[in-house]
Image (cartoon, rainbow, N blue to C red):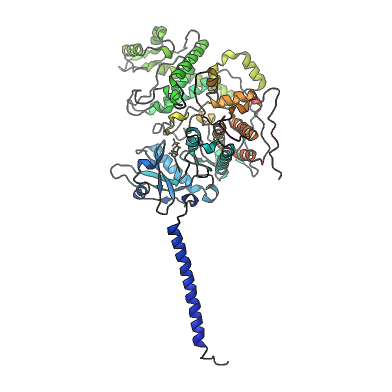
Amino acid sequence: MPDSNPTLLPPILAASLTVTALLLLLLLLIYRKKLSNKRTTPIPPDLIKPTTPTPPRRFSYSSLRLATSSFSASNRVGQGGFGSVFKGALKSGQEIAVKVMDHNGSLQGEREFHNELSLASKLDAATCADHVVSILGFSSDHHCRRRYRRLLLVYEYMRNGSLQDALLDKKCPELMDWKKRFAIAINIAKGIQILHCLSPPIVHGDIKPSNILIDAFFNAKLADFGLARALTEDEVGGTVLDEEGTKNGDNIDNGSILEETESVVTEEVALNVDLLSAEAVTLSPDETAVVDAPPSSTSECCLDVVSVDSGNIRRGGVGRKKSLSGRDWWWKQDGGGGSEPGRVKDYVMEWIGSEIKKERPNGEWNATPISVEGNGNETVNVKAEEKKHRKRFEWWGSLDEERIQKQNKKNRKKPREWWKEEFCDELAKKKKKREVKGSCGGEMWWQRDEFSAPERKKRKNSRGSKSSIDFWLDGFSGEFRSGRRNSQDWASGEIPKSGGISSTPSMRGTVCYIAPEYGGGGNLSEKCDVYSYGVLLLVLVSGRRPLQVTASPMSEFERANLISWARQLARNGKLLDLVDPNIQSLDREQAMLCITIALLCLQRSPSMRPTMVEIVGMLSGEADPPHLPFEFSPSPPSSFPFKTRKKAR
Ligand SMILES: Nc1ncnc2c1ncn2[C@@H]1O[C@H](COP(=O)(O)OP(=O)(O)OP(=O)(O)O)[C@@H](O)[C@H]1O
């Protein structure tokens, strides 16, 4: 081997050193450039893709306080059922929303907190980030002075707030563009579809506009998983989706209709009063459910029951002055818009009164004798008392409160107690009767869809059996039930939830949006979300709340209940009347598609409702356009001339 030339060694060494130094210099320059870039031009928060660590990151309370400027009022962006939501920014510059759970140690609040967290760790950020608001972290430090923990949830910040705010309250001009609304409808459907296709499927359980948040680019995402639940294997059985997304193992239901002798409303009331009595049991003696006055018919009771579910069962004593009185939530739901609640109320009250009188000409209320404990521990025969004073008690609208008080005092009973108990008894009987009927027919009341054509004809001829009140309240079966306190939504048609009252996890959802079978005590399934999505679609297309009274004319009153109005329009072949008149660049075909899908989702029988996979297919044009459910087909049956939207595959 030749000896290496010693004269070549120094230049080779020098050259390699120079190359190494140059490389190091280059690396240093690149690093510095990156660093300076970071300092001078911060990346817009919207472009920072939130990553969802699993499990979500733990924040200290003090760091979140710092991020939100001590939870300052100017940073408060919303109020939910369990506390306020504040805007904040992390040190990295990322904008966040911090939900401060105002749970005061309540079980329901804690349950929702843990529920959200545990579900967040089940959601894969990669698949869900575009359709579900990401949970970035949480804080659960001990409160320094109290016994409970401070529970805070940290989310990605959604610039345009909730769909409720943007569409119904602020009426964002962007949402007056049909394209945006349709895109939002698809976004939401895809979000729910993703949840339903997880293994195990997750049911959101509270789909409504205030739980849909909108980002800076008007993309809609699902939020608030406080009531969501992963289905167990047994629960999935009913609606397993195969690869095509079609139903598999779903009970075939031809939508047969049982002979109906009682109105849907009567049945709803029965269930809700059962709930009321169940809840009342859990209240301590001085925690009284406020129910305004003795009802003399099921229809009026319905309003009272609503009021109970709407947050008027309060802790800490009686007195209706502080909160909205029993029936008043309903009238205050649409405070804005120049409506005149007083006049509307009078008008509707008068009308309901006349309907009730029509139904029960003698003001008869078939009560059964029952005995109840009075204040003095003696037993009072309510039937006898009621009989004695019946003449004085016309229907509740004309009750003389003073007289009732006097009478109650005389009977040494709790104020306004006797009628309630008698009423509950009456309804319990009705419920029993219904159960027997249900078990014979093999179908629950809530499964009955709209009547078949011959059935409708039969009922048309015997109108007397179903009053216009029934018609008007149609579509709200089981919906007067909820599991949580509500947000500021007195004015939204969404009934406040009774947080802290019920600790039953099965009681969940929001009035008007909850599926009737679930509100009626049935099982939670993906189809509950489908129902709620149907209501939401109607709200999106019409740009109004599901329950809204804005003016006194009868025509307005008929439209107050969005669901029954949509059904009525479908029967008359006038579906497009439902569309928000403020919408610009309306695509009539897409609007018809949305309403048709909504009506399919709103079928009472869960198995008749489409799956979310099918809905996404229809909305995106991948699947054939749907037909209206048979019962809504105007006669002669005609469907909207959809151009075939099915894409060539
Ligand atoms: N990530 C977020 N980004 C921006 N705003 C938000 C965010 N989360 C919530 N908000 C705002 O705070 C409001 C309250 O939200 P929250 O989820 O606490 O209650 P909610 O869903 O309206 O009511 P409830 O708790 O009764 O279901 C929302 O309506 C929205 O305006």
- In terms of image quarters, where does ligand 1 lie? top left
Provide the residue span drawn in magenta: 580-584
Q: Is residue 333 magenta?
A: no
Q: Nearer the viewer, residue 376 or 477?
A: 477
Q: Nearer the viewer, residue 104 or 624?
A: 624
In the rendered image, residue 644, in percent from the top left (x then y), is placed at 70, 37
Marker count (numbered): 0
Q: Nearer the viewer, residue 491 or 240?
A: 491
In the rendered image, residue 109, in percent from the top left (x then y), is placed at 40, 38
In the rendered view of the protein, which quadrant contains the C terminus?
A: top right
Left or right of residue 156, residue 289 in this image? left
Left or right of residue 409, residue 625 in this image? right
For image coordinates 56% across by 45% down, the residue present is: 198
For image coordinates 45% across by 55% down, the residue present is: 42
- Can residue 224 be seen here? The reply is no
In the rendered image, residue 385, in percent from the top left (x then y), is placed at 38, 10
For image coordinates 50% across by 77% down, the residue present is: 19
For image coordinates 47% across by 62% down, the residue present is: 34
Looking at this view, name the residue that lies furthest to the left: 145
In the rendered image, residue 3, in percent from the top left (x then y), is placed at 55, 92
Q: Does residue 202 lie above or below 266 as drawn?
A: below
- Can residue 606 be seen here? The reply is yes
Quadrant of res 625: top right
Main secondary structure found in the magenta portion:
loop
In the rendered view of the protein, which quadrant contains the N terminus?
A: bottom right
